[in-house]
Amino acid sequence: MNIDRTATFGTFAINDIDLAYFDWPAKQPDRQAPTLIFAHATGFHARVWDAVIEHFPGHRVVALDLRGHGRSGGGPVADWRLMVSDVIALLEALGITQAVGIGHSMGGHVLLQCAADVPALFSRLVLFDPVILAPEFYAPGQPLFSADNPHPATRRKRDFASPEEMIERFRDRDPYCLFAPRVFEAYCRHGLLPAPAGAGLELACPPEVEGSIYASSRSNAAILDAARTVDMPVLVVRALQTDLNDFKSSPTWPALAEILPQGTDMHRPDRTHFHPFEDPADAARIIAEFVAYTSALRC
Protein backbone atom coordinates (compact mmCIF):
# COMPACT_ATOMS: atom_id res chain seq x y z
CA MET A 1 0.00 0.00 0.00
CA ASN A 2 1.30 3.44 -0.92
CA ILE A 3 -0.70 6.52 0.05
CA ASP A 4 0.28 9.84 -1.58
CA ARG A 5 0.44 11.74 1.66
CA THR A 6 3.10 14.15 2.84
CA ALA A 7 3.99 14.79 6.45
CA THR A 8 4.66 18.23 7.84
CA PHE A 9 7.85 18.38 9.88
CA GLY A 10 7.81 20.48 13.02
CA THR A 11 9.73 21.15 16.21
CA PHE A 12 8.68 22.37 19.63
CA ALA A 13 10.96 23.96 22.21
CA ILE A 14 10.60 22.19 25.55
CA ASN A 15 12.93 21.34 28.45
CA ASP A 16 15.94 22.99 26.74
CA ILE A 17 15.64 21.00 23.50
CA ASP A 18 13.77 21.12 20.21
CA LEU A 19 11.44 18.12 20.09
CA ALA A 20 10.73 16.97 16.53
CA TYR A 21 7.57 15.46 15.12
CA PHE A 22 5.92 14.55 11.82
CA ASP A 23 2.28 15.45 11.25
CA TRP A 24 0.21 13.77 8.52
CA PRO A 25 -3.17 15.39 7.86
CA ALA A 26 -6.10 13.11 7.09
CA LYS A 27 -6.19 12.46 3.34
CA GLN A 28 -9.81 11.33 3.53
CA PRO A 29 -11.09 13.43 6.45
CA ASP A 30 -13.51 11.79 8.84
CA ARG A 31 -14.59 13.98 11.72
CA GLN A 32 -15.24 10.88 13.81
CA ALA A 33 -11.73 9.51 13.30
CA PRO A 34 -9.45 10.16 16.29
CA THR A 35 -5.94 11.50 15.90
CA LEU A 36 -3.28 8.78 16.14
CA ILE A 37 -0.07 9.43 18.11
CA PHE A 38 2.91 7.13 17.45
CA ALA A 39 5.91 6.79 19.79
CA HIS A 40 8.93 4.66 18.92
CA ALA A 41 11.32 2.39 20.78
CA THR A 42 14.80 3.13 22.11
CA GLY A 43 17.29 3.73 19.32
CA PHE A 44 14.64 4.25 16.62
CA HIS A 45 12.73 7.27 15.33
CA ALA A 46 9.33 8.47 14.11
CA ARG A 47 9.67 7.27 10.53
CA VAL A 48 9.93 3.56 11.37
CA TRP A 49 6.14 3.81 11.65
CA ASP A 50 5.62 4.90 8.01
CA ALA A 51 4.54 1.45 6.80
CA VAL A 52 1.91 1.32 9.58
CA ILE A 53 0.77 4.94 9.24
CA GLU A 54 -0.07 4.55 5.55
CA HIS A 55 -2.95 2.24 6.53
CA PHE A 56 -4.76 5.17 8.22
CA PRO A 57 -5.48 7.79 5.52
CA GLY A 58 -8.67 8.92 7.29
CA HIS A 59 -6.85 9.88 10.48
CA ARG A 60 -4.58 12.74 11.37
CA VAL A 61 -1.34 11.10 12.51
CA VAL A 62 1.48 12.55 14.59
CA ALA A 63 4.69 10.54 14.97
CA LEU A 64 7.26 11.67 17.52
CA ASP A 65 11.03 11.73 17.60
CA LEU A 66 11.57 11.25 21.32
CA ARG A 67 14.35 13.14 23.11
CA GLY A 68 17.79 12.23 21.79
CA HIS A 69 16.34 10.39 18.80
CA GLY A 70 15.82 11.28 15.16
CA ARG A 71 15.78 15.02 14.67
CA SER A 72 15.07 15.87 18.30
CA GLY A 73 17.73 17.38 20.51
CA GLY A 74 18.91 16.08 23.83
CA GLY A 75 21.73 14.05 25.30
CA PRO A 76 21.81 11.06 27.65
CA VAL A 77 18.64 10.42 29.64
CA ALA A 78 18.78 9.72 33.37
CA ASP A 79 15.03 9.75 34.06
CA TRP A 80 12.32 8.53 31.69
CA ARG A 81 9.87 11.04 33.20
CA LEU A 82 11.73 13.76 31.30
CA MET A 83 10.60 12.18 28.02
CA VAL A 84 7.06 12.03 29.41
CA SER A 85 7.22 15.75 30.18
CA ASP A 86 8.41 16.46 26.62
CA VAL A 87 5.54 14.55 25.02
CA ILE A 88 2.83 16.04 27.24
CA ALA A 89 4.01 19.57 26.47
CA LEU A 90 4.10 18.91 22.71
CA LEU A 91 0.66 17.31 22.53
CA GLU A 92 -0.86 20.11 24.62
CA ALA A 93 0.78 22.70 22.35
CA LEU A 94 -0.72 20.94 19.31
CA GLY A 95 -4.14 21.01 20.96
CA ILE A 96 -4.48 17.24 20.84
CA THR A 97 -7.07 15.53 23.05
CA GLN A 98 -8.82 12.16 23.04
CA ALA A 99 -6.23 10.69 20.69
CA VAL A 100 -5.29 7.05 20.24
CA GLY A 101 -1.76 6.55 21.55
CA ILE A 102 0.29 3.84 19.84
CA GLY A 103 3.61 3.09 21.45
CA HIS A 104 6.28 0.46 20.97
CA SER A 105 8.70 -0.62 23.72
CA MET A 106 10.01 2.49 25.53
CA GLY A 107 7.47 4.57 23.56
CA GLY A 108 4.67 2.49 25.07
CA HIS A 109 5.96 3.17 28.58
CA VAL A 110 6.11 6.90 27.85
CA LEU A 111 2.57 7.09 26.44
CA LEU A 112 1.07 5.12 29.32
CA GLN A 113 2.64 7.53 31.81
CA CYS A 114 1.41 10.49 29.74
CA ALA A 115 -2.12 9.08 29.89
CA ALA A 116 -1.84 8.71 33.67
CA ASP A 117 -0.57 12.28 34.10
CA VAL A 118 -2.98 13.99 31.67
CA PRO A 119 -5.95 11.67 30.96
CA ALA A 120 -7.56 14.08 28.48
CA LEU A 121 -4.75 13.54 25.97
CA PHE A 122 -5.90 10.03 25.06
CA SER A 123 -9.11 8.07 24.69
CA ARG A 124 -7.36 4.69 24.35
CA LEU A 125 -3.91 3.18 23.94
CA VAL A 126 -2.33 0.39 21.90
CA LEU A 127 0.97 -0.68 23.43
CA PHE A 128 3.23 -3.01 21.46
CA ASP A 129 5.46 -4.76 23.99
CA PRO A 130 5.90 -1.77 26.31
CA VAL A 131 8.96 -1.69 28.56
CA ILE A 132 6.89 -2.04 31.71
CA LEU A 133 8.25 -4.89 33.76
CA ALA A 134 7.26 -6.84 36.85
CA PRO A 135 7.44 -5.08 40.26
CA GLU A 136 10.63 -6.89 41.26
CA PHE A 137 12.48 -5.30 38.32
CA TYR A 138 12.03 -1.83 39.85
CA ALA A 139 12.72 -2.85 43.45
CA PRO A 140 16.53 -2.40 43.44
CA GLY A 141 16.17 1.25 42.37
CA GLN A 142 19.70 1.83 41.11
CA PRO A 143 20.53 2.07 37.38
CA LEU A 144 21.18 -1.14 35.52
CA PHE A 145 24.50 0.17 34.16
CA SER A 146 27.07 2.77 35.19
CA ALA A 147 29.95 4.79 33.80
CA ASP A 148 32.28 1.95 34.81
CA ASN A 149 29.96 -0.67 33.34
CA PRO A 150 28.14 0.96 30.40
CA HIS A 151 25.48 -0.72 28.31
CA PRO A 152 26.92 -2.42 25.22
CA ALA A 153 24.91 -0.03 23.00
CA THR A 154 27.40 2.72 23.86
CA ARG A 155 29.96 0.91 21.69
CA ARG A 156 27.83 0.94 18.53
CA LYS A 157 29.36 2.19 15.31
CA ARG A 158 28.08 5.74 14.85
CA ASP A 159 29.71 6.93 11.61
CA PHE A 160 28.55 5.98 8.12
CA ALA A 161 29.46 7.32 4.71
CA SER A 162 25.90 6.83 3.44
CA PRO A 163 22.58 5.15 4.22
CA GLU A 164 23.60 2.43 1.79
CA GLU A 165 26.61 1.59 3.99
CA MET A 166 24.33 1.26 7.01
CA ILE A 167 21.87 -0.87 5.05
CA GLU A 168 24.63 -3.18 3.88
CA ARG A 169 26.18 -3.45 7.36
CA PHE A 170 22.97 -4.39 9.16
CA ARG A 171 20.87 -6.12 6.49
CA ASP A 172 21.69 -9.67 7.59
CA ARG A 173 22.18 -8.99 11.30
CA ASP A 174 19.84 -9.93 14.10
CA PRO A 175 17.27 -8.40 14.71
CA TYR A 176 17.33 -6.21 11.58
CA CYS A 177 17.06 -9.24 9.32
CA LEU A 178 13.55 -9.75 10.75
CA PHE A 179 12.28 -6.34 9.66
CA ALA A 180 10.06 -5.86 6.62
CA PRO A 181 12.32 -4.41 3.88
CA ARG A 182 10.53 -1.04 3.80
CA VAL A 183 10.78 -0.64 7.55
CA PHE A 184 14.46 -1.55 7.60
CA GLU A 185 15.22 0.93 4.82
CA ALA A 186 13.27 3.69 6.59
CA TYR A 187 15.16 2.91 9.81
CA CYS A 188 18.48 3.43 8.04
CA ARG A 189 17.62 6.35 5.76
CA HIS A 190 15.89 8.41 8.46
CA GLY A 191 18.22 7.23 11.23
CA LEU A 192 21.26 9.15 10.03
CA LEU A 193 22.04 12.86 10.19
CA PRO A 194 24.91 14.92 8.76
CA ALA A 195 27.96 14.65 10.99
CA PRO A 196 28.73 17.89 12.86
CA ALA A 197 32.26 17.84 11.43
CA GLY A 198 30.75 18.14 7.96
CA ALA A 199 31.87 14.82 6.46
CA GLY A 200 29.70 11.73 6.36
CA LEU A 201 26.72 10.82 8.53
CA GLU A 202 26.13 9.86 12.15
CA LEU A 203 23.45 7.90 13.96
CA ALA A 204 20.54 10.18 14.80
CA CYS A 205 20.37 8.43 18.18
CA PRO A 206 23.95 8.61 19.46
CA PRO A 207 25.21 5.44 21.15
CA GLU A 208 25.62 7.21 24.49
CA VAL A 209 21.95 8.26 24.39
CA GLU A 210 20.75 4.76 23.54
CA GLY A 211 22.91 3.29 26.30
CA SER A 212 21.65 5.83 28.84
CA ILE A 213 18.02 4.91 28.20
CA TYR A 214 18.67 1.23 28.80
CA ALA A 215 20.66 2.13 31.91
CA SER A 216 17.84 4.32 33.30
CA SER A 217 15.00 1.89 32.56
CA ARG A 218 14.26 1.63 36.31
CA SER A 219 14.03 5.40 36.73
CA ASN A 220 10.22 5.55 36.56
CA ALA A 221 9.52 2.96 39.24
CA ALA A 222 6.04 4.44 39.74
CA ILE A 223 4.85 3.28 36.31
CA LEU A 224 2.88 0.33 37.72
CA ASP A 225 1.04 2.59 40.17
CA ALA A 226 0.38 4.98 37.29
CA ALA A 227 -0.99 2.12 35.17
CA ARG A 228 -3.65 1.40 37.78
CA THR A 229 -5.07 4.91 37.25
CA VAL A 230 -5.34 4.82 33.45
CA ASP A 231 -9.07 4.28 33.14
CA MET A 232 -9.45 3.95 29.38
CA PRO A 233 -9.28 1.01 26.97
CA VAL A 234 -5.67 -0.16 26.70
CA LEU A 235 -4.53 -3.02 24.47
CA VAL A 236 -1.25 -4.64 25.52
CA VAL A 237 0.28 -6.65 22.68
CA ARG A 238 2.95 -8.98 24.06
CA ALA A 239 5.46 -10.97 22.04
CA LEU A 240 7.28 -14.18 22.87
CA GLN A 241 9.08 -13.91 26.22
CA THR A 242 12.29 -15.86 26.60
CA ASP A 243 15.35 -14.08 28.00
CA LEU A 244 15.53 -10.38 28.92
CA ASN A 245 19.11 -10.34 27.65
CA ASP A 246 17.73 -11.05 24.17
CA PHE A 247 16.42 -7.90 22.47
CA LYS A 248 13.89 -10.05 20.59
CA SER A 249 12.24 -11.21 23.82
CA SER A 250 9.22 -9.44 25.28
CA PRO A 251 10.12 -7.29 28.33
CA THR A 252 6.47 -6.72 29.25
CA TRP A 253 5.09 -7.94 32.59
CA PRO A 254 2.50 -10.57 31.59
CA ALA A 255 0.10 -9.26 34.27
CA LEU A 256 0.21 -5.66 33.02
CA ALA A 257 -3.23 -5.76 31.38
CA GLU A 258 -4.72 -7.17 34.58
CA ILE A 259 -3.82 -4.08 36.61
CA LEU A 260 -5.14 -1.67 33.97
CA PRO A 261 -8.78 -0.73 34.72
CA GLN A 262 -9.78 -1.44 31.10
CA GLY A 263 -6.81 -3.50 29.97
CA THR A 264 -6.84 -6.20 27.32
CA ASP A 265 -3.95 -8.61 26.86
CA MET A 266 -3.04 -9.92 23.40
CA HIS A 267 -0.29 -12.51 23.57
CA ARG A 268 1.49 -13.04 20.26
CA PRO A 269 4.16 -15.73 20.82
CA ASP A 270 4.50 -15.92 17.04
CA ARG A 271 6.17 -12.49 17.08
CA THR A 272 9.29 -10.99 18.63
CA HIS A 273 9.65 -7.68 20.43
CA PHE A 274 9.89 -6.06 16.98
CA HIS A 275 6.40 -7.08 15.90
CA PRO A 276 5.46 -3.71 14.26
CA PHE A 277 8.65 -3.84 12.18
CA GLU A 278 8.32 -7.51 11.23
CA ASP A 279 4.74 -7.19 10.01
CA PRO A 280 3.53 -3.58 9.80
CA ALA A 281 0.30 -4.64 8.08
CA ASP A 282 -0.53 -6.92 11.01
CA ALA A 283 0.26 -4.12 13.48
CA ALA A 284 -2.01 -1.77 11.51
CA ARG A 285 -4.79 -4.38 11.54
CA ILE A 286 -4.54 -4.74 15.32
CA ILE A 287 -4.72 -0.96 15.77
CA ALA A 288 -7.64 -0.55 13.35
CA GLU A 289 -9.66 -3.36 14.91
CA PHE A 290 -9.10 -2.02 18.42
CA VAL A 291 -10.07 1.52 17.38
CA ALA A 292 -13.21 0.24 15.64
CA TYR A 293 -14.19 -1.97 18.56
CA THR A 294 -13.68 0.69 21.22
CA SER A 295 -15.38 3.34 19.07
CA ALA A 296 -18.46 1.11 18.84
CA LEU A 297 -18.46 0.79 22.63
CA ARG A 298 -18.40 4.58 23.00
CA CYS A 299 -21.48 5.04 20.79
Image (tube, rainbow, N blue to C red):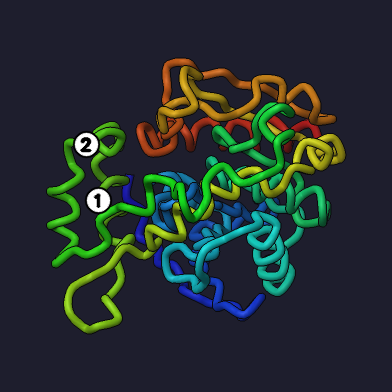
Total number of numbered labels? 2
**Crowdedness of circle 1 by 10 Å Cα count: few (<14), some, many (20+)?**
some
Answer with the quarter of the image where residue 172 lies: top left
Q: Residue at x 84, y 30 (%)?
A: 261
Q: Say if residue 299 shows up in the picture.
A: no
Residue placed under numbered mark 1 in the picture: 185
Badge number at residue 69: none
In the picture, which quadrant includes the N terminus?
top left
Q: Amino acid at mark 1?
A: Glu
Q: Residue furthest bottom?
A: 198
Q: Is residue 51 above or below residue 251?
A: below
| Residue 161 point in image, percent of width and height | 14, 67
Towards the viewer: 208 or 168: 208
Q: Residues within 10 Å of mark 2 (few under 14, many from 20)?
A: few
| Image quarter in which the C terminus is found | top right
278 sits left or right of 242 in the view: left
Please, what secondary structure does the residue beneath circle 1 have?
helix
Judge left or right: residue 193 versus residue 27. Answer: left
Question: What amino acid does circle 2 point to?
Answer: Arg
Residue 52 image position (x, y, % from top left) = 43, 44
Q: Is residue 159 visible?
A: yes
Task: Please identify, in this view, whether the residue under mark 2 or under mark 1 is nearer the observer.
Answer: 2
Q: Residue furthest front?
A: 148
Q: Is residue 63 above or below residue 176?
A: below
- Which residue occupies 84% across, 35% down? 228
Q: Nearer the viewer, residue 106 or 33?
A: 106
Residue in view at x 85 percent, y 38 percent: 231
Residue at which label 2 appears: 173
